Amino acid sequence: MAKKKNISEDKIISIYMDYVLEHGENPKSVYAFAKLHHFEETQFYDYFTGFEAVEKRIFEAFFTNSIRVLEKNEDYKIFDARNKLLSFYYTFFENLTANRSYVLQALNKHNNNLKNLRVLSGLRRHFTEYVHGLGIQMLDLKEKRLERLQEKALKESAWAQLLFIIKFWMEDQSSGFEKTDVFIEKSVNTSFDVLNIAPLQSVLDLGKFLFKEKIHMN
């Protein structure tokens, strides 16, 4: 029997993506997939529990590769939150575009129902942590429970925005996906304009002042 070759996580991802693109479907079984590519089935399980785990890791890789590129850019490090998020989106969608055939194959089979898609769960975790780390200014509510709810709402709205842009990109037929670039810019700018808390914070502070003064006067 021929000696089985060594296999790595990256290699499994690469040959899995090739298989899906060539056959238009997932491999029938891990056994058949491993046999086709001349490695032991047990080697697959050193890295993944099944094909869904491979798909999940692929979408996580789109995120981590984008961040790796951004962190090499000195200008990115001094950007404010708005421009960091814009830079992330442009880089992330460049990665998706470079792998568009696979992404469409992987997501279209779910009838564009992306919201609760398990293969995007890892991407969701990474992305919402990234948004949290941007330090986007929010209302100073001075109450831990309310601040946690506000932070959760920010993460959920950011994730919903990313999914909406992905769906737009999947349907975009414009040259170079230029409409997606415009949509990204308008979406992010609108989001940050809505999050402009300076006037809201002033109203909140005034309300607190008047409330305290009313209590004092009574």
Image: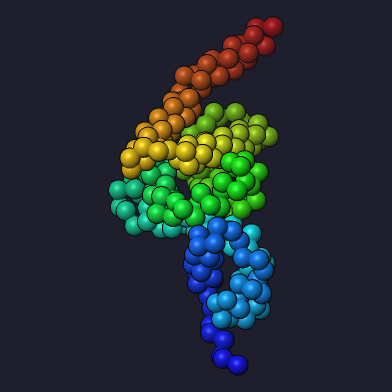
Q: Quadrant of residue 24?
A: bottom right
**Closest to the observer, 76 or 185:** 185
Residue at the location (51% across, 20% down)? 200
- In the displayed structure, 134 sits above or below 61; it is above
So how many labels did they put on this image?
0
* Residue that protrudes farthest toward the top in the picture: 218
How far across and how far down the image is residue 162, in percent?
51, 40
**Closest to the observer, 87 or 53:** 53
Q: Where's the C terminus, which quadrant?
A: top right
Residue 15 visible from this viewpoint:
yes
How far across and how far down the image is residue 153, in percent?
60, 34
* Residue that protrudes farthest toward the front in the picture: 23
Q: Quadrant of residue 52?
A: bottom right
Residue at the location (54% across, 28% down)? 139
How far across and how far down the image is residue 44, in percent?
62, 74
- In the displayed structure, 132 sits above or below 9; it is above
Residue at the location (62% across, 81% down)? 40
Residue 43 visible from this viewpoint:
no
Question: What colour scheme does the image use?
Answer: rainbow
Q: Quadrant of residue 213?
A: top right
**Closest to the observer, 69 or 129:** 69
Residue at the location (48% across, 42% down)? 170
How far across and how far down the image is residue 103, in percent?
50, 51
Q: Answer with left or right where residue 148 lies relative to residue 182.
A: right
* Residue that protrudes farthest toward the left in the picture: 75
Q: Where's the N terminus, which quadrant?
A: bottom right
Q: Answer with left or right where residue 184 lies relative to residue 107.
A: left
- In the displayed structure, 93 sits above or below 19; it is above
